[in-house]
Amino acid sequence: MRKSIAVQAVVLIAAAASFASAQASFSLSTTALVGPSELGFDSGIKSVGRVDGVYAAKPGAPGNPRSFPFAWSGLPAGTKALALVLDDPDARLVLAAYGMKGDAFLHWIATDIEPALGGLGDNASAKASFPQGKNGGGSVGYTGPQPPTDIPKDVQSKRIHVYRLKLFALSSPTGLKSGFSLDELLSAVAGRTLGTAELDLSYSNQ
């Protein structure tokens, strides 16, 4: 996990909330759930359910680039493109254990997604025709949940991580090229956002 990217995740989510608060909301859903709602062990965020492990990875294993499917509905009028951010706010203590600052780890950013698609299918990141940015590991595209089983050490409860998928409805495409950063995405969506939606999923390797 790279320090600069992990820190930027917090900046993006906080800033996005400030300019999206007065805008329209719409709906997100997924068929990739295999378990009930759970609470993030550190964030306290309640998920809609546990994401299937086929979209995640075990600690120490190679990262999993297979993204989960999800759909959107009720987009604001005038939506011409979509952008997404997927991050893990329960990674805060994990980052600290590695001597890194930040309140979230970034798993996926993408932009200029065609609204008419109605959703992204299984493994869409690998098949993408839309631009994707760098995740917290420094690679372009999706990297799945991979929470450790023993970090932080002083936690008695099950280490459940929540993954926030946030979708931005945009009035025009950003024009960003693949490999963009969080700062670049933030600057691009700030003046184009018509509305936002969030879907919170959970996962644990315990």
Image (spheres, rainbow, N blue to C red):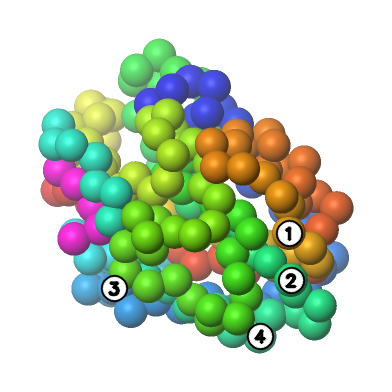
Residue at which label 1 appears: 173
**Mark 2 lies on residue:** 80
Above-or-below relation of 154 to 79: above
Nearer the N terminus, badge 1 or badge 4? 4
Tell me the magenta residue range: 54-58
- Contact, CB < 8 Å: mark 1 with mark 2? yes
Most distant residue in the bottom direction: 74
Kindly report which numbered mark, 3 or 4, lies closer to the viewer in this rendering.
4
Q: Is residue 153 above or below residue 112?
A: above
Q: Give how far apart the Cα atoms at labels 3 and 1 are.
A: 30 Å
The residue tagged 3 is: 33
Image coordinates of residue 24 in percent, x first then y, are 77, 74
Q: Secondary structure at mark 2?
A: loop
Q: Earlier in the sequence, mark 4 or mark 2?
A: 4
For the residue marked with disc 3, what is the amino acid? Leu
Q: Nearer the viewer, mark 3 or mark 1?
A: 1
Q: Is 122 colored magenta in this rendering? A: no
